[in-house]
Image (cartoon, rainbow, N blue to C red):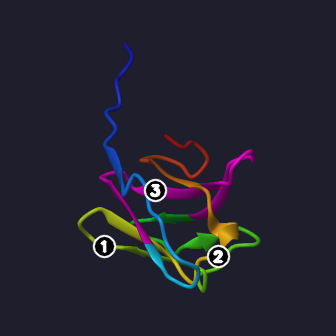
Amino acid sequence: SGSELGCSITQWPEYALKRAGESVDLTCYTTLAYMFWYQQPSRSSLKLIVSTSKWHQNYYEEGYSEAKFELSRDKNNLSIMTIKNVTFKDAATYFCAANDHTMQQEH
């Protein structure tokens, strides 16, 4: 018999407009253990920025750093990614994804 996995994930704000040099906070709420932040520039592919879990430190992909994409996750299942000193190159759609099992299988 198969089991059904219920997923809960919410991301906000839906849209953010910032001036160059400002910072922007992207917030994601999930009860799942593993969390992933992705960046998708216009007309480009989805790129993983950082992965994190409730128990481990943050793992940044090549080309991304904490100095630019600061990540915090509290015990209330809330994750905030702050993009610092934004430029036109940061204009993109950002996604958070989550999974409860392995780092390889995102939800």
Residue extent of the magenta highlight: 25-50
Which image quadrant for residue 58?
bottom right
Disc assigned to residue 74 = 1
Label 2 – label 1 distance at C-alpha: 28 Å
Tell me the chief SS of the magenta region. Answer: strand
* Callout 3: SS: strand
- Is 30 situated left or right of 23 in this image? left
Which residue is identified by label 3? 34
* Callout 2: SS: loop
| Residue 38 placement (x, y as % from top left) | 59, 56
| Residue 84 placement (x, y as % from top left) | 54, 82
Position above or below: 34 against 19: above
| Residue 82 placement (x, y as % from top left) | 47, 75
Q: Amino acid at mark 1?
A: Asp
Find out whether the residues at labels 3 and 2 contact each other: C-beta distance under 8 Å.
no
Which residue is identified by label 2? 87
Local crowd size for mark 3, using a 10 Å CA cut-off: few (<14), some (14–19), many (≥20): many
Position above or below: 60 against 38: below
| Residue 26 placement (x, y as % from top left) | 42, 65
Q: Nearer the viewer, mark 1 or mark 3?
A: 1
Q: Please name the residue shown 35% across and 46% down the image.
A: 9
Label 3 – label 2 distance at C-alpha: 29 Å
| Nearest to N terminus: mark 3 or mark 2 | 3
Q: Amino acid at mark 2?
A: Thr
Quick check: is 36 in the magenta stretch? Answer: yes
* Callout 1: SS: loop
**Which residue is situated farthest in the top direction here?**
1
Position above or below: 2 against 20: above
- Is 106 situated left or right of 47 in this image? left
Quick check: is 97 in the magenta stretch? Answer: no
